Image (spheres, rainbow, N blue to C red):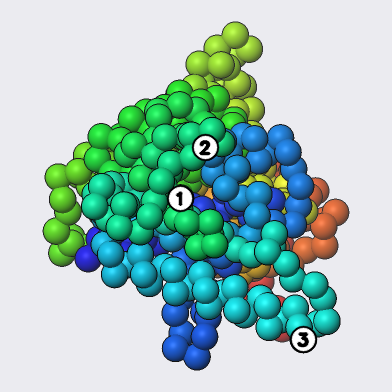
Amino acid sequence: MTRFIHDRFAKEYLAELLSPIGTVNIGRDVTSEVREIDVCFIPNTAIPEYSSSLGLLGKMAQTTAIFEPFRNPITVSEVWGCMSKLWDLQSELERQARRENTRYDGAQWPRLWILTPTASKALVSGFGGIPNLSNWIEGIYFFPEHWRGAIVVIHQLPETPETLWLRILGKGKVQMRAIAQLSALATDDPLRITALELLYRLQSNLVADPKQQLEAEERELIMAIAPLFQQQLQAAEQQGIERGIERGRQEQQRLILENFLRVRFGELTPQMTIFLAPISKLSAAEFTVLLLAISMLSVNEAGGEAAVKLLAENTLKMSAPDLEDLLPQAVTNLLALPGEELTLLVEQLSELSAEELRARLGKIPE
């Protein structure tokens, strides 16, 4: 069922956007019955400018919180399930405070944010949900005070920049309009790059299995996402006309790759930095394929290492196509070089003959 693909996208999307300002756990287990929290967020890094750029989502992330995103309209039983997770987490945090002999007061209690595309009036009123327009915007219904939660009806949120990052999690036309507004942001906007990467991965997952029965709105979603990466590259080429199309394209591809890697893996490793210049010389089509391949990697140390291998592999393919028959060994030998030696060899690749490269990179270590 494609619902699980959308659920995974929502969890990863929230985790990526919130990780710069706090600790994010996806799928945190609570209690012996193992109820899994979708996204558990604990703020720890105050970055006012970044929080402000997240708009409404940043305001929600000012305190410890549980985010429970739903692809389809939430039901009564699902609301109860979310509330149970909140109470379990609160009890767990109180027990932890007692073990550590630290104070835990009401201001530290977590808050529950249920994100749903739509919700009936009967469901909202049945849980005592009311708006708080003096402090929050339309579309958010707060439970009674001590319940510490709210239902966020995404399709009722005003379509303003402040709500963009939540409306990306909507459905149908609401999500389509949010994606259109996303595409209008600057191509080097870090949040745009993050959202674009995750949306492109969502598209890939939706089309990966031909047995899946896609809904009409999912087919429209795929069509809406597809042009975004090409738009990123076309914008780069357009900006490069004044300085020479090819040079400008390479500079912009380098910037896109640098931001893409930094947003995905948190920081650039020295080896990633070495390959930025040669990879920027790939054609637009090859560059897009590479970004898609990297976007499918896990967001951890192993994923970062796999990304470096992809960068090295594409650099060798471009500079020395005759090494195809021993490419895996050449990549291994290349990445085994010390930093300075690796940098020098990468810079010299275009000047070395196929025989020289085979002699230096084609040997199997004894």
User: Which residue is more in the foreground, 28 or 254?
Assistant: 28
User: Tag 2: residue type?
Assistant: Trp
Q: Position of residue 321 (x, y in %)?
A: 51, 50
Q: Residues within 10 Å of mark 2 (few under 14, many from 20)?
A: few
Instruction: State how far apart marks 1 and 3 are (Cα).
Output: 32 Å
User: What residue is rendered at 15% in x and 50% in y?
Assistant: 215
**Which residue is tagged 3?**
99
Q: Position of residue 167 (x, y in %)?
A: 40, 39
Upstream in sequence: badge 3 or badge 2:
3
User: Which residue is more in the foreground, 27 or 293?
Assistant: 27
**Which residue is tagged 1?**
142
Residue 196, above or below 177: below
Upstream in sequence: badge 1 or badge 2:
2
Q: Residues within 10 Å of mark 3 (few under 14, many from 20)?
A: few
User: Which residue is more in the foreground, 348 or 78?
Assistant: 78
User: What residue is rendered at 40% in x and 28% in y?
Assistant: 159
User: What residue is rendered at 54% in x and 44% in y?
Assistant: 57
Q: Nearer the viewer, mark 1 or mark 3?
A: 1
Instruction: State how far apart marks 1 and 2 are (Cα).
Output: 10 Å
Mark 1 and 3 residues: CB-CB less than 8 Å, in contact? Answer: no
User: Tag 3: residue type?
Assistant: Arg
User: Tag 1: residue type?
Assistant: Phe
Element on which disc 2 rests: loop
Q: Residues within 10 Å of mark 1 (few under 14, many from 20)?
A: many
Mark 1 and 2 residues: CB-CB less than 8 Å, in contact? Answer: yes
Instruction: State how far apart marks 3 and 2 are (Cα).
Output: 36 Å
Mark sitting on residue 136: 2
